[in-house]
Amino acid sequence: MEDYNKIIESLGVRFIKAKNINILKPVTVENNYDIENTLILVTKGSLKFGKEKEQVNAGEILFIPGGRLLSITYGSGKSESLSKDDFLSNRENYLRVYETEQGDHESYSYVSFEAKAFDSVNFFASLDIPPFKITSNHSKFVNLISDINSEIVSNAPGKGRVVKLLTERLVVELIRYILKQGLFVEQFATNSTYFKDPRLIDIFTFIKENLGEDLSNKILANVANVSEDYVGQYFKMLTGINPQDYIEYQRMEMAVNLLRTSKKSIREIGKDVGYKDTAYFCRRFKMMFGIPAGKMRRRESLMNL
């Protein structure tokens, strides 16, 4: 239990966004992908997710870890199947944000957040766990998701502080739920082991602080004080992913953040996150997220669903 407490204490939690959504008509997004973690509370109707089309009914919750490619169906009944690119171009036909009125439509509420260990490691992505449904002992999740959405649309003083605290509580409750249900025991045990290794934490920190620079295995080997031939094996042994794949994920995560928060050109953003070739950066971005970088920027400048 002490190891789990250390992991929880190491987490930096950041609220990203929260919305209440009406489903205007059923739609399946075949290649849904987001860098942030998301908890979805179905308030009316149902959702389906994954290859097996597992159903999430009203009152149940779906957790989607960041970085997971996922098929998700919003609404019950026969749905139209779209790529994420097509869905984002036409989403107003399928989903609509609401504040207080649900009407007769199926609906859900969600909260998206970031959770990083040592301000470097995307915690739930590092577990490499699949999306899963929360069906029992979940009243705390329902209340927290509802409270966060209520705060977001309020004008009450201190709402930012309240949302931050509620989101941190939401993450702790999620970890407690996973542990109590005995889910992903091996992954948690692995994390608790490698989070103790200072050399690995040094690598994570170095990568975060130098995403625009050369991050070859030779450079990482110097950081960890191991041989160049061994550093890739060492990193994958402890994390389950090779270092260059991890670096690309971190670079793309930063690129999304820059698209959301800056007015830099696509070329500048690609260079800032370590891609000298803009065309290659754009190809990799679309391959990872299913949409071009420019379209994601336009999406973020509009109403976020």
Image: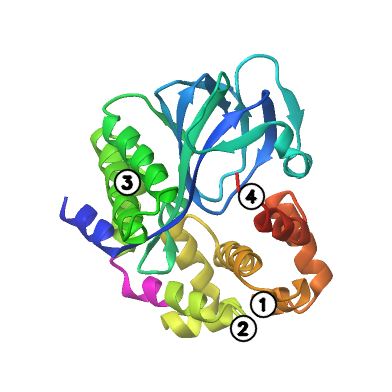
Pointer 1 residue:
274
Describe the element under mark 4 as helix, strand or loop.
Answer: loop
Residue 170, numbered label: 3
Give me the C-alpha separation between circle 4 and circle 3: 24 Å
Q: Main secondary structure of the magenta part?
A: helix
Amino acid type assigned to the residue bearing label 2 in the image = Glu
**Left or right of 137 in this view: 102:** right
Name which of mark 2 and mark 3 comes first in the sequence. 3
Give the residues in magenta. Answer: 196-202
**Left or right of 194 in this view: 99:** right
Mark 4 touches mark 1? (CB < 8 Å): no
Residue 157 pos. (x, y %)? 32, 59
Residue 195 pos. (x, y %)? 32, 64
Farthest top residue in view: 77
Q: Quadrant of residue 135?
A: top left
Pointer 4 residue:
303
| Residue in the image at 64% along x and 49% along y | 303
Amino acid type assigned to the residue bearing label 3 in the image = Leu
Give me the C-alpha separation between circle 4 and circle 2: 34 Å
**Left or right of 3 in this view: 278:** right
Pointer 2 residue:
213
Q: Is residue 271 visible?
A: yes
Nearer mark to the viewer, of 2 and 3? 3
Amino acid type assigned to the residue bearing label 1 in the image = Gly
Name which of mark 4 and mark 2 comes first in the sequence. 2
